[in-house]
Each structure stands twice: as structure tokens, then as C-alpha cells.
Image (cartoon, rainbow, N blue to C red):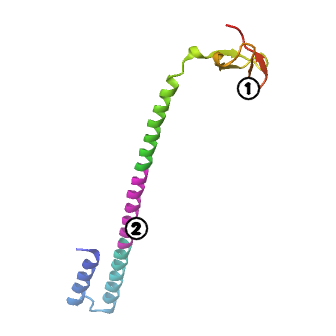
């Protein structure tokens, strides 16, 4: 039985039993019924808001799940990219320190001619690479 049905039942009891036989009792029972109706309306309003919030949270949960799936897919793609880095063969590259800025970097000796200068990626100054 809903709150509104219970209030209607109480109103019927009050009216049927002639409980409000004096003006004071009639005023009291009238105020009591108005209060109960106000409470029932408030409960109904809160129930509507609760249902709307529940729908919103369900949608939000679905959206977060989709984002998690997308994020997991990106992480899997990154793992595949990491395999490319594992193919980095350190023997093909050499480490050198720039004589101008004193910063280290790697270069590929096979890509340079013997008389060709290296270009520092940090300061941009050319210099002769060391013979190995």
C-alpha cells in the first residue's frame, strides 16, 4: 500500500467515525492530514530524484567502463610498440660526448663517412667523431 493509499484510508476512518465532532478536533485532524499529504508528496519527489540519479549513475558506469576498455586497448598497443624498442641493437650504435656542450648521445657509425662530421643534437655544433 502506497503512502497516498494509507492517507486516504486514514481520511476515510476519520470521516467515517465522526472523530472530528468538535471544531478543535476537526482543525487537528485537518492539520494532521495536510502534514501527512505533504510528507507523502516529499517522499514521492525524492523517489523520482532517486530514480533519475540511479539512471544517471548507470550511464556513468557504462561510460567509465568504455573508457577503461579504450585505455586497456591503448596499453596493449603500447606493449606492442615496446617490442620495437627491444629490437634496438646497441652494437649498431655508439655513444659519444660532444666536446662543446659535454652531453652524451648515440649515433650510428655505419651511417657516416670517415671524413664526415657528427652534429650534436643538443647544441648543434659539428665535430669529428672518434675513431674506434
The residue drawn where x is 43% and y is 41% is 73
Disc with the residue nearer the chain's start (1 vs 2)? 2
Mark number, residue 55: none
Q: Residues within 10 Å of mark 2 (few under 14, many from 20)?
A: few
Please tell me whether residue 6 is drawn above or below residue 21 in the rendered image.
Answer: above
The residue drawn where x is 34% and y is 75% is 40
Question: What residue is disc 2 on?
Answer: 49
Is 72 one of the magenta-colored residues? no
User: Between residues 43 and 114, which one lies in front from this camera angle?
Assistant: 114
Mark number, residue 122: 1
Residue reaching furthest top?
132
Residue reaching furthest left?
17
- In the rendering, at what x and y percent does residue 48 appear? 37, 70
Instruction: Magenta stretch: give its range.
Output: 44-64
- In the rendering, at what x and y percent does residue 15 appear? 24, 89
Looking at the rendered image, the quarter that the N terminus falls into is: bottom left
Mark closer to the observer (1, 2): 1
Q: Residues within 10 Å of mark 1 (few under 14, many from 20)?
A: few
Kind of element beneath mark 2: helix
Q: Give residue 3's quadrant in the image.
A: bottom left
Q: Give residue 9's quadrant in the image.
A: bottom left
The residue drawn where x is 26% and y is 85% is 11
Looking at the rendered image, the quarter that the C terminus falls into is: top right
The answer for how far apart the CA atoms under marks 1 and 2 are is 61 Å
Amino acid at each position: 500500500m502506497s503512502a497516498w493509499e494509507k492517507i486516504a484510508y486514514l481520511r476515510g476512518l476519520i470521516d467515517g467515525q465522526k472523530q472530528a465532532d468538535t471544531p478543535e478536533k476537526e482543525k487537528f485532524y485537518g492539520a494532521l492530514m495536510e502534514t501527512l499529504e505533504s510528507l507523502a508528496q516529499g517522499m514521492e519527489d525524492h523517489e523520482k530524484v532517486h530514480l533519475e540519479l540511479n539512471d544517471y549513475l548507470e550511464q556513468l558506469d557504462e561510460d567509465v567502463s568504455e573508457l577503461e576498455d579504450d585505455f586497456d586497448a591503448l596499453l596493449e598497443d603500447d606493449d606492442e610498440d615496446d617490442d620495437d624498442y627491444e629490437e634496438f641493437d646497441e652494437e649498431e650504435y655508439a655513444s659519444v660526448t660532444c666536446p662543446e656542450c659535454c652531453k652524451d648521445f648515440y649515433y650510428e657509425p655505419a651511417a657516416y663517412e670517415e671524413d664526415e662530421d657528427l652534429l650534436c643534437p643538443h647544441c648543434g655544433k659539428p665535430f669529428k667523431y672518434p675513431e674506434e
